[in-house]
Image: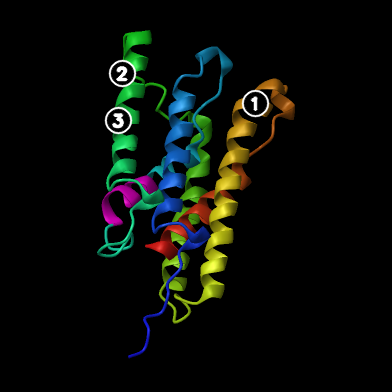
Amino acid sequence: MAEPQYHRHPLGLPAGSVRATLSLFVAGLFWTLLFIPDEKQIPIPLFLYFLSALILLFFFAHGKSIGTPGGRSPWGLPRGTFRFILVAGTAAVFGIYYYQHHELPFAKLVPQPAQLSQWPNLLISLVAGLGFGWLVGRGPWRNSYAFQDIQAWVSLLAMLGLTAEIIIVLFINPTLKEETKLDLSVWECILTGIVAWYFGARS
């Protein structure tokens, strides 16, 4: 009898580990920005709302794409750990915000009018990334080591990109004058496309 083909997952981690990590990156940035004082004038970037759709995809629709019978859950943790963290973390952030401000942070979650011009490009990036990733992920090369290595590199780019976004939004742009602040609109479209491609290819 032929031995079954060994199927690697990106970075050699259990299936779903990278998607879980990216989901926590996005949620963590959301949580952090909610606590930034209003006088700092750091709005929540619009692309995070689009990436939140990918968190929902991870949360609800990843059952068949993560793990096999007897396989390990993301990062080898008990099944449902990351879903619990996302729900409990969001509830805790809302609870702490309410305790501090005596109101829920719904006003801070409303995008600013100046940001709304970005949504067509972000929507195109999200849909194109998901669609192209889904198509590529269905090719005959799906289980090849080369394709799995490409996915690993894309996953690293996505995590590094989100890390760079956090550093720029929280630490660099607030120190610059308004006319010298870095315009991240193109970068956020690219980042949205990269993260969406990865989710599409792994779905």
On residue 48, which mark appears? none
Q: Nearer the viewer, mark 3 or mark 2?
A: 3
Which range is magenta? 53-62
Q: In what quadrant of the picture does the C terminus appear?
A: bottom left
Q: Is residue 89 magenta?
A: no
Instruction: Find disc 3 in the rendering and name its residue.
Output: 88
Instruction: Find disc 1 in the rendering and name its residue.
Output: 171
Q: Main secondary structure of the magenta part?
A: helix
The location of residue 125, given as percent across then percent down, is 50, 55
In space, the residues marked 3 and 1 are separated at their CA atoms by: 27 Å
Q: Earlier in the sequence, mark 3 or mark 1?
A: 3
Instruction: Find disc 2 in the rendering and name its residue.
Output: 95
Q: How many residues crowd mark 2 within 10 Å: few (<14), some (14–19), many (20+)?
A: some
Kind of residue indicated by mark 3: Ala
In space, the residues marked 3 and 2 are separated at their CA atoms by: 10 Å
Q: Earlier in the sequence, mark 3 or mark 2?
A: 3
Give the answer, above or below, for where 188 lies relative to 150.
Answer: above
Judge left or right: residue 58 versus residue 160.
left
Q: Secondary structure at mark 3?
A: helix
The location of residue 118, given as percent across then percent down, is 52, 42
Nearest the eye: 21 or 199: 21
Which residue is at a point 32% across and 23% down the rendered structure image? 92
The location of residue 186, given as percent across then percent down, is 62, 47
Which residue is at a point 55% across and 24% down the rendered structure image? 42
Kind of residue indicated by mark 1: Phe
Kind of residue indicated by mark 2: Gly
Q: In what quadrant of the picture does the N terminus appear?
A: bottom left
Judge left or right: residue 167 versus residue 142.
right
The location of residue 176, given as percent across then percent down, is 72, 23
